[in-house]
Amino acid sequence: MRNDSVHRRRLVCNPAAETADPVEAPAPAAGCARLSGAPTLGTVTSSVQLTVHRFRVTLLDVTPPVWRELRAPSVVGLHLLHAVVQIAMGWEDRHLHEWSIGDRLYVASDEEDWGERALDESGVTLADVGPPDSAFTYLYDMGAGWEHLVEVLAVTPYDATVIPLACLDGARACPPEDIGGPSGYEHLLDALGDTADAEHEEMVERYGDHFSPDDFDISRVNERLEELWRAY
């Protein structure tokens, strides 16, 4: 089995060219279709209009809530969506992940320890698994158990006036990696917020200079998402 602590993937996709008119089946670079898991858009008939998903990702079992509202092309595959969630939430992609959608489990194509029940995440798109008003879960770091609820808020035609991949809103920083899951994060917040706590000084020394639970830099998130989208 691959070492979970160093498990990383670089997932990128190139956008369709933007025009002043509504986008109807533009031809992206070949890498986009490969990464999305969708058919090559250049082979789709011009009568098919591209759509975008607007969805909310909420980290469960933490208070106050950590959440992001995102927009992404409906044709992106779950393996690219994994990269999007990692960037938007602020994770560092150090650990394994899985998607639980209905009675199906989707994992990375190069992971073999889930057994025959697990399906390849690169073989399905957001459109395949996320109709309007649906919800599913994304689990990151099996040891820590960071579970995220993904709620599809809307599916709308893409009009090419904006970059199709973006963070629209959100609140609070995601927890530091390897803090020990929701219970470890709760302990960290308690220690940072209480000068009388026995571990206050230790936690401030370890995390205080570079971690603030209230921080969320949406501009930086969108810079990174645009880099992801335009990389190929």
Image: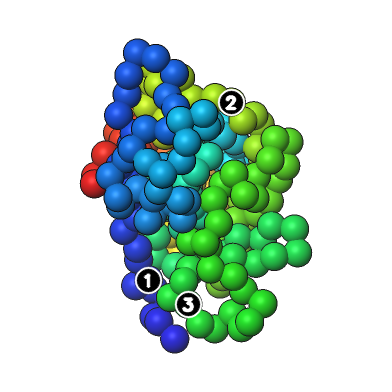
Q: Residue at x 41, y 44 (%)?
A: 43
Residue 111's label in the rendered image is 3
* Label 1 crowd (10 A; few <14 / some 14-19 / many >=20): few
Image quadrant occupied by the N terminus: bottom left
Secondary element type, mark 1: loop
Question: Label 1 is placed on what type of residue?
Answer: His
Q: CA distance from mark 1 to mark 2?
A: 34 Å
Secondary element type, mark 2: strand
Say above or below: 23 vs 66: above
In this rendered view, identify the residue nearer to me: 38 or 196. 38
* Label 3 crowd (10 A; few <14 / some 14-19 / many >=20): some
In this rendered view, identify the residue nearer to me: 119 or 113. 119
The residue that disc 2 covers is: 156
* 8 displayed left or right of 57: left
Residue 95's label in the rendered image is none
Q: Are marks 1 and 3 in contact (CB under 8 Å)?
A: no
In this rendered view, identify the residue nearer to me: 203 or 196. 203
